[in-house]
Image (tube, rainbow, N blue to C red):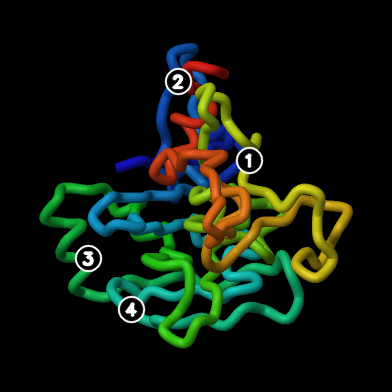
Amino acid sequence: MEVKANWVPADEVDSADYYVSEAPDGKKYALVAMHIISKVLPNWTWATFEHQNNPGRCDYTGCHDAYGAVVADVDANEVLDRPYSACAKNDALKAVLGSAGLSPVWEHYCLKGSQTDFVSATGVPTQLGNSVTEAGFADTSSCITCHARAAVNAKGIKTTPAGFVDPPIPALCPNPSGSCSPNGAPDPNWFWTNPGKLDQAAVAMPTDFIWSIARHAIGH
């Protein structure tokens, strides 16, 4: 399992509503967003959470939580970066949190959505992006597709610095001057020359969705 978290100085928010951690230097920080990924499925399970006070937390894709939220599906606002209603939790999730001995502040964190595959059952690319972690490209973000690009070549050197479409392709990127994430199924050309042909040759080896392996490979 891997957790990626975003923090802000605790004095910038009403810290009573946040999970707060103290750093080694004594400064306190409040958790505002996090990704949790788990290798329980071949393509991993991807989930992203945001504090309910984050403006724009359901932008672009809406928020979807069929397990723990009283309102399972929240539509995206027409105007970006606006507040959303609190993500009230149902009794079943409250019982789970309580039995685990977790603080009530965790009820203020909302599941934006999850991914288990690159496309839906009808072939539509799935998307998932956090307004904090993916700020600037949440409109195209796909956690699973971005991480699928994590790879190294025969010398152990990462083949791309990140999962972005580089250079941006106007047909895929609403804002070609900014960052843009690929979504949908992986492109065979990321890993092969002449993919599907008799003379195809491997040019990159995927690192099982783990960027930290690609970025700290032996040839780095």
Question: Which residue lies under the disc numbered 3?
Answer: 94
Sequence-wise, which precedes: disc 3 or disc 2?
A: 2
Sequence-wise, which precedes: disc 4 or disc 2?
A: 2
Q: Taking 108 as reference, is 190 above or below it?
A: above
Badge nearest the viewer, 4 or 2: 4
Is 147 or 139 nearer to us in this picture? 147
Sequence-wise, which precedes: disc 4 or disc 3?
A: 4
Q: Residue furthest right?
A: 177
Name the kind of residue labelled 4 in the image. Ala
Badge nearest the viewer, 1 or 4: 1
Q: Taking 140 as reference, is 133 above or below it?
A: above
Sequence-wise, which precedes: disc 1 or disc 4?
A: 4
Task: Classify 10 Å Cα crowding around label 1: few (below 14), some (14-19), many (20 and above).
Answer: some
- Are dots 1 and 2 in contact, CB under 8 Å? no
Q: CA distance from mark 4 to mark 3?
A: 14 Å
Q: CA distance from mark 3 to mark 2?
A: 29 Å
What residue is rendered at 67% in x and 79% in y? 77
Q: Which mark is residue 66?
A: 4
What is the secondary structure assignment of the residue under circle 2? loop
Name the kind of residue labelled 2 in the image. Ala
Task: Classify 10 Å Cα crowding around label 3: few (below 14), some (14-19), many (20 and above).
Answer: some
Question: Which residue lies under the disc numbered 2?
Answer: 23
Give the left or right position of residue 1, taking residue 9 as reference: left
